[in-house]
Amino acid sequence: MSETKTDSKKSWDFVHNRAEEAKWTQGLREIFEYRDLGIKEGTKGDYIAHLIRNNGKEAKNTVKEWHVHDCNFQFVLVLNGWATFEYEGQGVKTIRKGDSINQVPGIKHREIDCSDDFEVLEIVSLADFKTRVVEAPA
Protein backbone atom coordinates (compact mmCIF):
# COMPACT_ATOMS: atom_id res chain seq x y z
CA MET A 1 0.00 0.00 0.00
CA SER A 2 1.34 3.45 -0.80
CA GLU A 3 2.38 5.82 1.96
CA THR A 4 -0.34 8.33 1.06
CA LYS A 5 -3.15 5.76 1.32
CA THR A 6 -1.80 4.45 4.60
CA ASP A 7 -1.49 7.95 6.06
CA SER A 8 -5.01 8.86 4.90
CA LYS A 9 -6.59 5.77 6.45
CA LYS A 10 -4.72 6.28 9.72
CA SER A 11 -6.14 9.79 9.98
CA TRP A 12 -9.74 8.66 9.48
CA ASP A 13 -12.00 8.22 12.50
CA PHE A 14 -14.20 5.30 13.39
CA VAL A 15 -17.86 6.26 12.96
CA HIS A 16 -20.95 4.56 14.37
CA ASN A 17 -24.00 6.41 13.08
CA ARG A 18 -27.04 5.29 15.04
CA ALA A 19 -30.37 5.00 13.23
CA GLU A 20 -32.29 5.87 16.40
CA GLU A 21 -30.49 9.25 16.47
CA ALA A 22 -31.00 9.99 12.77
CA LYS A 23 -31.66 13.57 11.72
CA TRP A 24 -33.23 14.11 8.32
CA THR A 25 -32.60 17.52 6.75
CA GLN A 26 -33.32 19.46 3.58
CA GLY A 27 -30.60 18.84 1.02
CA LEU A 28 -29.64 19.49 -2.56
CA ARG A 29 -33.09 18.75 -4.01
CA GLU A 30 -36.23 20.14 -2.38
CA ILE A 31 -38.18 16.92 -2.99
CA PHE A 32 -35.67 14.86 -1.02
CA GLU A 33 -34.52 14.78 2.56
CA TYR A 34 -31.06 13.65 3.56
CA ARG A 35 -29.58 11.73 6.48
CA ASP A 36 -25.85 12.30 6.84
CA LEU A 37 -24.10 9.10 7.98
CA GLY A 38 -21.05 10.79 9.53
CA ILE A 39 -18.60 9.64 6.87
CA LYS A 40 -17.61 13.17 5.85
CA GLU A 41 -16.22 13.86 9.31
CA GLY A 42 -14.86 10.33 9.71
CA THR A 43 -12.87 10.50 6.46
CA LYS A 44 -11.80 14.13 6.96
CA GLY A 45 -13.76 15.19 3.87
CA ASP A 46 -12.52 12.45 1.53
CA TYR A 47 -16.04 10.97 1.20
CA ILE A 48 -19.62 11.70 2.12
CA ALA A 49 -22.31 9.06 2.57
CA HIS A 50 -25.95 9.83 3.07
CA LEU A 51 -29.37 8.33 2.74
CA ILE A 52 -31.71 10.25 0.46
CA ARG A 53 -35.47 9.74 0.40
CA ASN A 54 -38.50 11.29 -1.21
CA ASN A 55 -40.16 13.69 1.23
CA GLY A 56 -43.51 13.91 -0.57
CA LYS A 57 -43.11 17.48 -1.83
CA GLU A 58 -44.03 18.30 -5.41
CA ALA A 59 -41.05 18.72 -7.74
CA LYS A 60 -40.51 22.09 -9.35
CA ASN A 61 -39.09 22.23 -12.87
CA THR A 62 -35.65 23.16 -11.47
CA VAL A 63 -35.33 19.66 -9.99
CA LYS A 64 -35.43 18.26 -13.49
CA GLU A 65 -32.73 20.52 -14.93
CA TRP A 66 -29.64 19.00 -16.46
CA HIS A 67 -26.77 19.17 -14.02
CA VAL A 68 -23.38 17.72 -13.11
CA HIS A 69 -21.67 16.97 -9.82
CA ASP A 70 -18.04 18.04 -9.53
CA CYS A 71 -16.69 14.95 -7.82
CA ASN A 72 -14.22 12.09 -8.27
CA PHE A 73 -16.57 9.24 -7.39
CA GLN A 74 -20.33 8.79 -7.01
CA PHE A 75 -22.05 5.53 -6.11
CA VAL A 76 -25.81 5.10 -5.69
CA LEU A 77 -27.61 2.04 -4.29
CA VAL A 78 -31.41 2.01 -4.43
CA LEU A 79 -32.82 0.87 -1.08
CA ASN A 80 -36.49 1.37 -1.87
CA GLY A 81 -38.77 2.37 -4.72
CA TRP A 82 -37.61 3.58 -8.12
CA ALA A 83 -36.49 6.69 -10.02
CA THR A 84 -36.04 7.53 -13.67
CA PHE A 85 -33.04 9.57 -14.77
CA GLU A 86 -31.61 10.58 -18.12
CA TYR A 87 -27.84 10.39 -18.52
CA GLU A 88 -25.70 11.95 -21.23
CA GLY A 89 -24.69 9.21 -23.66
CA GLN A 90 -26.60 6.54 -21.69
CA GLY A 91 -30.23 7.47 -22.31
CA VAL A 92 -33.11 7.11 -19.89
CA LYS A 93 -32.56 4.67 -17.03
CA THR A 94 -35.01 3.57 -14.36
CA ILE A 95 -33.26 2.41 -11.21
CA ARG A 96 -35.15 0.13 -8.83
CA LYS A 97 -34.72 -1.38 -5.38
CA GLY A 98 -31.45 -3.32 -5.34
CA ASP A 99 -29.98 -1.55 -8.39
CA SER A 100 -26.75 0.42 -8.17
CA ILE A 101 -25.02 3.01 -10.32
CA ASN A 102 -21.42 4.08 -10.58
CA GLN A 103 -22.18 7.57 -11.83
CA VAL A 104 -19.22 8.71 -13.92
CA PRO A 105 -17.71 11.99 -12.65
CA GLY A 106 -19.03 14.98 -14.58
CA ILE A 107 -21.76 13.10 -16.47
CA LYS A 108 -24.69 15.34 -17.38
CA HIS A 109 -27.94 13.99 -15.98
CA ARG A 110 -31.41 14.91 -14.83
CA GLU A 111 -34.15 13.37 -12.77
CA ILE A 112 -37.40 12.68 -14.58
CA ASP A 113 -39.57 11.05 -11.90
CA CYS A 114 -39.44 8.95 -8.74
CA SER A 115 -41.74 6.87 -6.56
CA ASP A 116 -43.14 8.13 -3.27
CA ASP A 117 -41.04 5.55 -1.40
CA PHE A 118 -37.78 6.23 -3.29
CA GLU A 119 -34.72 5.93 -1.03
CA VAL A 120 -31.02 5.55 -1.87
CA LEU A 121 -27.63 5.30 -0.28
CA GLU A 122 -25.21 7.69 -2.00
CA ILE A 123 -21.44 7.77 -1.49
CA VAL A 124 -19.45 10.61 -3.07
CA SER A 125 -15.85 11.78 -3.11
CA LEU A 126 -14.83 14.42 -2.35
CA ALA A 127 -17.33 15.24 0.37
CA ASP A 128 -17.68 18.93 -0.50
CA PHE A 129 -18.64 18.35 -4.13
CA LYS A 130 -20.47 21.07 -6.04
CA THR A 131 -23.50 20.68 -8.28
CA ARG A 132 -23.85 22.85 -11.38
CA VAL A 133 -26.81 23.31 -13.74
CA VAL A 134 -25.61 22.79 -17.33
CA GLU A 135 -26.94 22.91 -20.87
CA ALA A 136 -28.70 19.78 -22.10
CA PRO A 137 -26.45 17.43 -24.05
CA ALA A 138 -26.53 17.69 -27.83
Image (tube, rainbow, N blue to C red):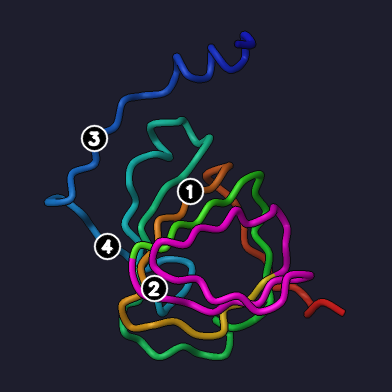
Boundaries of the magenta span: 80-108
The kind of residue on which mark 4 rests is Trp
Which of disc 2 and disc 4 is earlier in sequence? 4
Q: Circle 2 sits in a helix, a strand or a loop, which is it?
A: strand
- Answer few, some or many: residues within 10 Å of disc 3's Cα (few below 14, many 20 plus, some between 14 and 19): few
Determine which residue is flagged by label 3: 16
Assess whether mark 1 and mark 4 are in contact (beta carbons under 8 angstroms): no
Q: Circle 1 sits in a helix, a strand or a loop, which is it?
A: strand
Q: Where does the image place residue 66, in percent across and percent down from the top left? A: 68, 77
Assess whether mark 1 and mark 2 are in contact (beta carbons under 8 angstroms): no
Q: Where does the image place residue 13, in percent across and percent down from the top left? A: 35, 24
Determine which residue is flagged by label 2: 32
Q: Where does the image place residue 98, in percent across and percent down from the top left? A: 40, 61
Determine which residue is flagged by label 4: 24
* Measured Cα–Cα span from mark 2 to mark 3: 24 Å
Q: Is residue 86 above or below residue 128?
A: below
Q: Is residue 120 above or below residue 134?
A: above
Which of disc 3 and disc 2 is earlier in sequence? 3
Assess whether mark 2 and mark 4 are in contact (beta carbons under 8 angstroms): no
The kind of residue on which mark 1 rests is Ile
